[in-house]
Image (spheres, grey):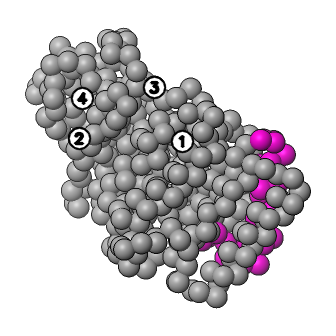
Amino acid sequence: MSNIPKELDKNMIVSADAEGLVWYDAANLDLYGFAGIEGDTYRRLPKEVAEATNPGTARNASHTCGGRVRFSTDSKRIAIRVKMPYMTKYDHMPMTGAAAFDMYDDYPDSHHYVCTFRCQMTDTDGYTSKRNVLGGKMRYYTINFPLYSPVSTLEIGIDEGASLGEGAKYISVPPIVYYGSSITQGACASRPGIAYQSIINRRLEIDFVNLGFSGNAKGEQAMANYIASLDMSAFVCDYDHNAPTAEHLEATHYNFYKTIREKHPKLPIIFVSKPDFDNGYEQSVARRRVIEDTFYRAREEGDKHVFYIDGQGLYRGYFKEECSTDGSHPNDIGMMKMAESIGQMLTRVLRNRI
């Protein structure tokens, strides 16, 4: 990681305000986790792909989970100014996770949580938040986008006269792609940086794409085709929870795998079964059997690049009973445990690339 980041073009300044802050459009900075910006919406999935799956995915494709902007600055203040079509408010998930941003200081070889840019319960279409930081020399930062809300525009504010430069770079390999349910999307982390993919991201320094679609990851062929078109270092398949029935999972799971494998003969593919195993035990057993059948069938066919994590063990250990908010969705403890297990597997399968 370079200690002298390249300063960005001053022509990218959007505006300056009476408080001495100069504002830059995040769309002109180093963005990660997005398929693009269509119209006035950051998107994780192209509109035509989302609409070819189901209405829920079409809606959730504009939720910004896994989105990040990275930059460097010597400013003593960092602010955000965000416009949002709506701000999701749940009874089981903090707004700091569903609708707010958080920020990390990216030291060489480590990351430190700086702050959460908190919104208010009364906010409906965006907000502005400012924080004091350690200024005086160039530091690298990552701001994580909300897990369960869409974003139209994000502006980064820094002190007038301060420098703004490019962000820290990830390891030069393709991203890890995750596909799955509300848990994959980030429910119910207390802030974006605690979603399990973000924790793994800070450990491995590999970019990632979050294709979690709450309640709507059903293994459609259109989704499999899209994911197969992506350049990936690894693929984590975790849509067990959203298949309407075990029979639906059986009808889609192996075919989903084969679609990916035909395009990526040596890609590490990790299957994960749902972590809340005791919630609907008989269905959990039936669903797990489907995933195991895909795994063993692939192995019998000679595929040495498939791996399996039994979700029943993800919440193992002393704090097992404290891992969820509602018996299903992981809280921060649950997210940490998922990051530990899935992260260890990714470290193993990518050991020759990191």
User: Of 313 and 64, which appears nearest the observer?
Assistant: 313
Considering only vertical position in the picture, is 81 above or below 251? above
Identified at 23% across, 50% down, the residue is 118
Q: State the CA–CA distance, disc 3 to disc 1.
A: 13 Å
SS label for mark 3: loop
How dense is the environment of label 1, judged by Cα within 10 Å: few (below 14), some, or many (20 and up)? many
Three-letter amino acid code at the position of disc 2:
Val
Identified at 48% across, 61% down, the residue is 338
Q: State the CA–CA distance, disc 1 to disc 2.
A: 21 Å
Judged left or right of residue 304, residue 208 is: left
Say whether residue 72 is visible: yes
Say whether residue 252 is visible: no
The residue wearing badge 1 is 208
Q: State the CA–CA distance, disc 1 to disc 4.
A: 26 Å
The residue wearing badge 4 is 157
SS label for mark 1: strand
How dense is the environment of label 4, judged by Cα within 10 Å: few (below 14), some, or many (20 and up)? many
The residue wearing badge 2 is 114
The residue wearing badge 3 is 169
Disc 1 or 4, which lies upstream in sequence?
Answer: 4
